[in-house]
Image (tube, helix red, strand yellow):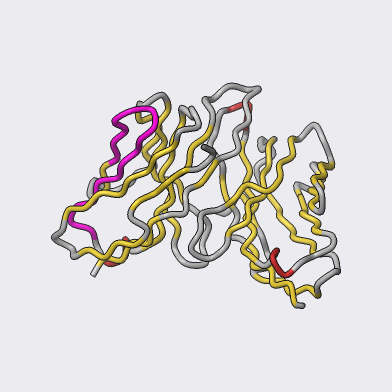
Amino acid sequence: DQQVKQNSPSLSVQEGRISILNCDYTNSMFDYFLWYKKYPAEGPTFLISISSIKDKNEDGRFTVFLNKSAKHLSLHIVPSQPGDSAVYFCAARALFRGQNFVFGPGTRLSVLP
Amino acid sequence: DTEVTQTPKHLVMGMTNKKSLKCEQHMGHRAMYWYKQKAKKPPELMFVYSYEKLSINESVPSRFSPECPNSSLLNLHLHALQPEDSALYLCASSQATGPRANYGYTFGSGTRLTVV
């Protein structure tokens, strides 16, 4: 049973437009969330995080939104650039319980020039 | 130094071979992890070391044997693997546990393992 879901395996966006990647989770104990970006032949790279006490966190072109009642978070990339083309993983953990992160299956983003 | 270094980057081994994967970090992180990732799947946790002690073994077969010689190094010893063990093996590290610490992981680039 997947606790972290990314229902879109792939997404294509035009350069300069907004990319929205979605993530849903089932465990209500999750209270800390990360987004990772992964290029081929490289390990995942930390992108941005959000804790459950917030509903938004912004870092440059990247913004993560958290809707706790819907158990949903999303990553917005504005404006999208060709270099953003990668696989994006959502990860979640129950920080208070010291659990390790659970990863979603990933969404492959392609930003078209 | 803000990296996790994994060697080798690629490894091909026979089912009777013995090999080791190595992971090194010099960020002072006291938790280190081994993940296995198959194509188009999320990383799956295998082992967690906290302060050089094995704290989690996610029911991994004994043909995978982890070792943490010191706080900067993590090894994964491989013996009698099966073709289905072919995958990307990722090492990660994070700061020691504690409710106010940043638990973001730093990942290495991985070792692409092929068992023939």
Left of A54 or right of it: where is A7? left
Residue B99 on image: x %, y %: 63, 22
Which residue is painted at 42% across and 27% down in the image? B50
- Write down the region rendered in magenta: B66-81
- The answer to whether any part of residue B89 appears in the image is yes
Q: Position of residue B115 (x, y in %)?
A: 26, 66
Is B49 inside the magenta-drawn segment? no
Name the magenta segment's main secondary structure: strand
Q: Residue at x 35, y 26 (%)?
A: B53
- Vertical placement of B47 versus A45: above or below? above
Residue A24 appears at what percent x and percent y? 71, 53
B35 or B19: which is nearer to us?
B19
Residue farthest to the left? B16
Residue closest to the eye, A55 or A5: A55
**Exactly how many numbered labels are in the figure?**
0
Image height of A96 relative to B36, above or below: above
Q: Quadrant of residue A82?
A: bottom right
Question: Which residue sits at x=67%, y=49%?
Answer: A35
Quadrant where the image shows the C terminus of chain A: bottom right
Q: Where is residue A51, by image quadrant?
A: top right
Task: Confirm whether the magenta stretch covers residue B70.
Answer: yes
Relative horizontal placement of residue B14, taking residue B46 as reference (left or right): left
Residue A66 visible in the displayed image: no
Residue at position x 18%, y 65% in the image: B14
Quarter of the image where one finds residue A20? bottom right
As drawn, is B95 to the left or to the right of B38?
right
Please indicate whether residue A100 sits to the left or right of residue B54 in the image.
Answer: right
Residue B9 image offset from top left, x and y in percent: 37, 58
